[in-house]
Image (cartoon, grey):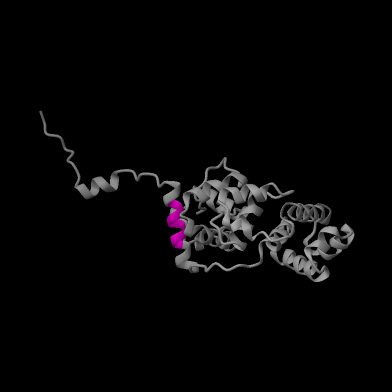
Amino acid sequence: MPASSTTSGSPQQERLRRPRRPTSPKRRAAEVLKLLQQQQGVPVWYQRYDPTTELVFTILSQHTSDVNSERAGHKLKATFSSWDAVADADPALVAEAVKSAGLSKQKVPRIQETLKRVRELTGDYDLTFLKEMPLADAKVWLKALPGVGPKTTAIVLSFALGLPAMAVDVHIHRVTGRLGIIGPKVNVNKAHDILEAMLPEDDIYGFHVALIAHGRQVCKALRPLCGDCVLRDACPGRRE
């Protein structure tokens, strides 16, 4: 019987031929954060606003640009002397102050109802007590306020109180979906808890900042700049 013409390859060749094991979402998230922070740097947390101001400004930011919502928020605080004054004001006056944020008919009632509910529950507008609660309890407390969902809750807890809550916006949802960190059926609301659970607490704020910047500057919705992307070699959703 003739000898076979095939021979076994070297151990190195065998390793090269062997298919790579899929990277877990948790490991992929860690790799993505490392690459983005090598490019962008590591952000240092700072408190943007007190929790109630962050809450109101976040409501104003819905469906508008940061520039417009910031302008509206500062105009609101300049127009009214206190949160009591905002809560009890004629809605038309509040709408005039925040008109640059748009959607006043939806946002003004939500802001006033939320402020009144905070006042009813706490006796004032100081939400710093949330920092002393277990994170899950603080989330439940905020989500019970009128019109406050997972994103607003996470923004208040993260940016105003420095807690490890993962806020997910459209940019983070899009980028993590393209990278395969979250599945295609995971919506924005579900993504908050999924991403938060797979990240070390100390990395949550940095992941949020890095992914938003990457989504705005590189991994854009309609025309992603895949050729300029530091993550392109690891991205299953890249465009050639």
Image quarter for residue 84?
bottom right
Q: Quadrant of the N terminus?
A: top left
x, y percent for residue 193: 55, 47
Q: Which residues are magenta?
A: 28-35
Residue closer to the observer: 67 or 98: 98
x, y percent for residue 223: 60, 57
Name the residue located 62 percent from the left edge and 58 percent from the top edge.
129
Give above or below for 211 relative to 16.
below
x, y percent for residue 183: 52, 43
Residue closer to the observer: 238 or 134: 134
- Residue that extends furthest to the left in the rendered view of this protein: 1
Could you tell me if residue 40 is visible in this image? yes
- Asked if the magenta segment contains residue 62, the reply would be no
- Residue that extends furthest to the bottom in the rendered view of this protein: 78
- Residue that extends furthest to the top in the rendered view of this protein: 1
Number of numbered labels in the structure image: 0
182 to the left or right of 114: left
Image quarter for residue 116?
bottom right
Could you tell me if residue 178 is visible in this image? no
Name the residue located 52 percent from the left edge and 68 percent from the top edge.
43
Give above or below for 116 relative to 85.
above
Residue closer to the observer: 168 or 91: 91
Name the residue located 55 percent from the left edge and 67 percent from the top edge.
45
**Majority secondary structure of magenta residues:** helix
Residue closer to the observer: 111 or 191: 111
33 to the left or right of 216: left
x, y percent for residue 224: 57, 57
Name the residue located 74 percent from the left edge and 48 percent from the top edge.
146
